[in-house]
C-alpha cells in the first residue's frame, strides 16, 4: 500500500471541460437542450477571466481551476450566459463562497450578462459544502446562491448507469477520493475499470481521447513504469498505438508550433505560446515546463511584440 496520498493533476479539469462541455451541461442541468443552443460553438474566455482575476498564490493545500464559458441561448437571440466552473480539491482556506461572489460581481460588472455559477467540489471533507454567500448590516442584506456539486455525495452505481460521458469523469474523481492510499496495482485495475466504463458510452473520437487522457493522468502512479505498463495494456486492448496523453500531446504540439515558426529557441517559446493559447495560466506553465515565473513573463512580452 502507498504510505501517502496520491498526487492529482487538477489542471487537467481545464482541458477535459472544454473537450466534454456539452456533455457537462447535460450532466449538470437536465433542461440543457431546451435552454442552450448547442449547435453554436462555445467561447472559452480564459484570457478574459485571467485579466479580471490575475493569478495569485493560493497557499498550501488550496487548489482550484476556473473556467469561464460563453454559451448561447436556444431562443436564437444574441443574449448569452457565462458559466463559471470551479474545482475545489481541498477545503483550503474555506473562502470559496466569498470568491464565488467576487467572481460573480466582477464578471457582471464587465459583461452585464446572465451568469450561472457552479462549484464542483472534489474534496474529501463530507461537511464542506458551500452554496451561499451572505452579508447583513442594519437592514441591508446581500445573499448570493450558487450551484454546488459535491463529488463525494455521488453514488458509484448511479454514475455507472449514467450514459453521459461526463459521468466517467465524475466517477474517476470519486474513485480518486475513495482510494487515496491504494497500491499501484490497485490503481491500475481502477484505471482499466474506468476505461471499460468509457468504451460503453457513445461519443466522438476527440471526446473519447479526452476521457482516456483524464482517467490515465488525473491520478499519478508512484512508479512511472506502471503507467507505461497500463498504456501498453490499453494499446493491446484496442489494437493500436496512438494513445498519446494530454500532457505529452500539448507539449509536443507546442514544440512543433515553435519549430514551424522558425523562432530561435522555438522549442521553449512555442511551448509557452501554445500552452497560453490553450488556457494555461503563467503558474501552470512554469510548473509544466520547469521555468521560473520571470522567464515565462519575459516570453509573454516578446510574443506580444511579435
Image: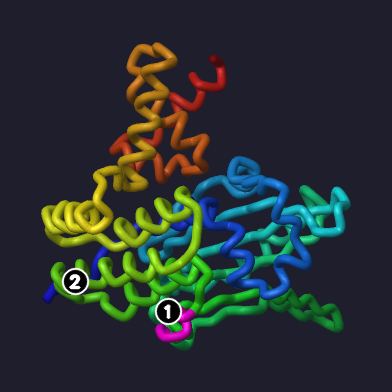
Label 1 or label 2, whichever comes before in sequence order:
2
Residue at (54%, 82%) from the top-left corner?
129
Residue at (23%, 58%) from the top-left corner?
237
Q: Nearer the viewer, residue 70 or 287?
A: 70
Left or right of 300? Residue 219 is: left
The image shows residue 11 at horizontal and vertical percentages of 42, 53
The image shows residue 82 at horizontal and vertical percentages of 71, 56
The image shows residue 53 at horizontal and vertical percentages of 60, 49
Q: Nearer the viewer, residue 252 or 65?
A: 252
Instruction: Please tell me whether mark 1 or mark 2 is closer to you in this view.
Output: 1
Identify the residue position indicated by label 1 in the image: 160
Q: CA distance from mark 1 to mark 2?
A: 28 Å
User: In the rendered view, would you say 293 is above or below 23?
Assistant: above
Q: Quadrant of the N terminus?
A: bottom left
User: In the rendered view, would you say 117 is above or below 277?
Assistant: below
Q: Quadrant of the C terminus?
A: top right
Identify the residue position indicated by label 2 in the image: 4
Residue at (75%, 77%) from the top-left corner?
143
Residue at (40%, 13%) from the top-left corner?
263
Kindly report the secondary structure that dominates the magenta region of the rendered protein: helix
The image shows residue 72 at horizontal and vertical percentages of 76, 53
Q: Quadrant of residue 66?
A: bottom right
Left or right of 55? Residue 100 is: right
Amino acid at each position: 500500500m502507498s504510505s501517502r496520498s496520491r498526487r492529482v493533476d487538477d489542471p487537467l479539469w481545464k482541458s477535459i471541460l472544454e473537450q466534454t462541455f456539452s456533455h457537462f451541461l447535460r450532466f449538470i442541468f437536465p433542461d440543457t437542450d431546451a435552454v442552450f443552443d448547442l449547435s453554436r460553438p462555445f467561447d472559452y474566455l480564459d484570457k478574459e477571466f485571467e485579466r479580471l482575476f490575475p493569478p495569485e498564490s493560493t497557499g498550501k493545500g488550496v487548489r482550484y481551476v476556473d473556467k469561464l464559458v460563453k454559451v448561447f441561448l436556444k431562443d436564437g437571440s444574441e443574449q448569452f450566459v457565462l458559466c463559471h466552473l470551479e474545482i475545489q480539491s481541498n477545503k483550503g482556506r474555506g473562502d470559496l463562497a466569498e470568491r464565488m461572489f467576487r467572481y460573480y460581481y466582477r464578471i457582471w460588472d464587465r459583461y452585464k450578462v446572465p451568469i450561472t455559477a457552479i462549484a464542483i467540489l472534489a474534496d474529501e471533507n463530507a461537511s464542506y459544502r458551500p452554496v451561499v454567500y451572505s452579508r447583513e448590516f442594519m437592514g441591508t442584506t446581500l445573499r448570493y446562491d450558487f450551484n454546488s456539486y459535491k463529488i463525494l455525495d455521488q453514488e458509484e452505481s448511479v454514475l455507472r448507469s449514467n450514459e453521459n460521458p461526463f459521468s466517467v469523469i465524475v466517477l474517476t474523481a470519486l474513485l480518486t477520493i475513495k482510494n487515496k492510499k491504494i497500491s499501484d496495482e490497485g490503481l491500475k485495475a481502477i484505471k482499466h475499470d474506468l476505461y471499460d466504463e468509457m468504451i460503453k458510452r457513445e461519443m466522438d473520437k476527440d471526446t473519447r481521447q479526452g476521457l482516456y487522457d483524464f482517467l490515465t493522468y488525473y491520478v499519478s502512479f508512484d512508479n512511472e513504469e506502471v503507467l507505461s505498463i497500463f498504456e501498453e495494456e490499453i494499446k493491446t486492448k484496442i489494437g493500436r498505438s496512438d494513445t498519446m496523453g494530454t500532457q505529452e500531446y500539448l507539449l509536443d504540439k507546442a514544440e512543433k508550433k515553435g519549430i514551424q515558426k522558425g523562432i530561435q529557441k522555438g522549442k521553449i517559446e512555442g511551448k509557452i505560446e501554445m500552452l497560453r493559447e490553450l488556457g494555461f495560466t503563467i503558474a501552470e506553465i512554469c510548473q509544466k515546463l520547469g521555468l521560473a515565473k520571470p522567464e515565462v513573463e519575459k516570453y509573454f512580452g516578446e510574443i506580444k511584440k511579435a
